[in-house]
Image (cartoon, rainbow, N blue to C red):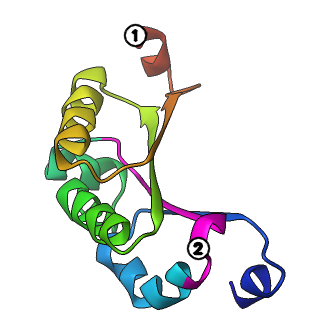
């Protein structure tokens, strides 16, 4: 990170760790507009999230973290990928819009997953 900062290189960080990334918030702020910090948001239901992403922060924790980052002037993004359950993705998308904590949205469909991806439009 310090090398990116030294050379003013644009960087994007994607995390599933929630609040764990906040230990670097002072470093993130030093980047100004050359950094984006984002979180993967796949489910709103914490149990479903942990089933697919064991060891990751809960979706609500990730949204709270994005809110803290945005409040501290850090550009935020959310990566809705993979979309496993479209209903869950829509629910977490709506929660993120209500929270107004995301500057950039990215969406990616589930791909090549035992035929389950064929059910998703």
Circle 1/circle 2 CB separation < 8 Å = no
Name which of mark 1 and mark 2 comes first in the sequence. 2
Which one is in front, 92 or 3?
3
Q: Secondary structure at mark 1?
A: helix
Report the span colored magenta.
Answer: 30-42
Residue 106 placed where, x, y %? 51, 37
Residue 99 horizontal side relative to residue 11, left or right: left
The quadrant holding residue 1 is bottom right
How many neighbours does mark 1 have within 10 angstroms: few (below 14), some (14-19), or many (20 or more)?
Answer: few
- 25 shown above or below 89: below
Residue plotted at (28% across, 66% down):
57
- Image coords of residue 49 (percent x, y): 26, 49
> Is 48 rendered above or below residue 113?
below
Residue 109, position as x, y percentages in the image: 50, 25
Residue holding disc 1: 119
Q: Residue at image x 42%, y 70%?
A: 73
Position of the C terminus, as image quadrant, is top left
| Residue 31 shown left or right of residue 56 in the figure | right
- The residue that appears at 76% across and 79% down in the rendered structure is 4
Q: Secondary structure at mark 2?
A: helix
Distance between the alpha carbons at the discs numbered 1 and 2? 41 Å
On the image, which quarter does residue 65 sit in?
bottom left
> Who is closer to the viewer here, 74 or 51?
74
Q: Name the foreground residue: 52 vs 15.
A: 15
65 relative to 52, above or below: below
Check residue 41 for magenta coloring. Answer: yes
The residue drawn where x is 50% and y is 24% is 114
Reading the image, the residue beneath label 2 is: 32
Q: Is residue 95 magenta?
A: no
């Amino acid at each position: 990170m310090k090398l990116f900062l030294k050379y003013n290189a644009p960087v994007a960080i994607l995390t599933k760790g929630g609040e764990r990334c906040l230990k670097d918030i002072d470093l993130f702020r030093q980047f100004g507009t050359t950094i984006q910090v984002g979180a993967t948001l796949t489910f709103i239901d914490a149990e479903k999230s942990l089933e697919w992403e064991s060891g990751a922060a809960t979706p609500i924790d990730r949204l709270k973290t994005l809110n803290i980052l945005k409040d501290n002037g850090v550009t935020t993004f959310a990566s809705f990928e993979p979309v496993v359950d479209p209903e869950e993705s829509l629910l977490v998308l709506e929660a993120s819009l209500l929270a107004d904590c995301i500057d950039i949205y990215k969406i990616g469909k589930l791909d090549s997953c035992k035929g389950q991806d064929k059910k998703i439009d």
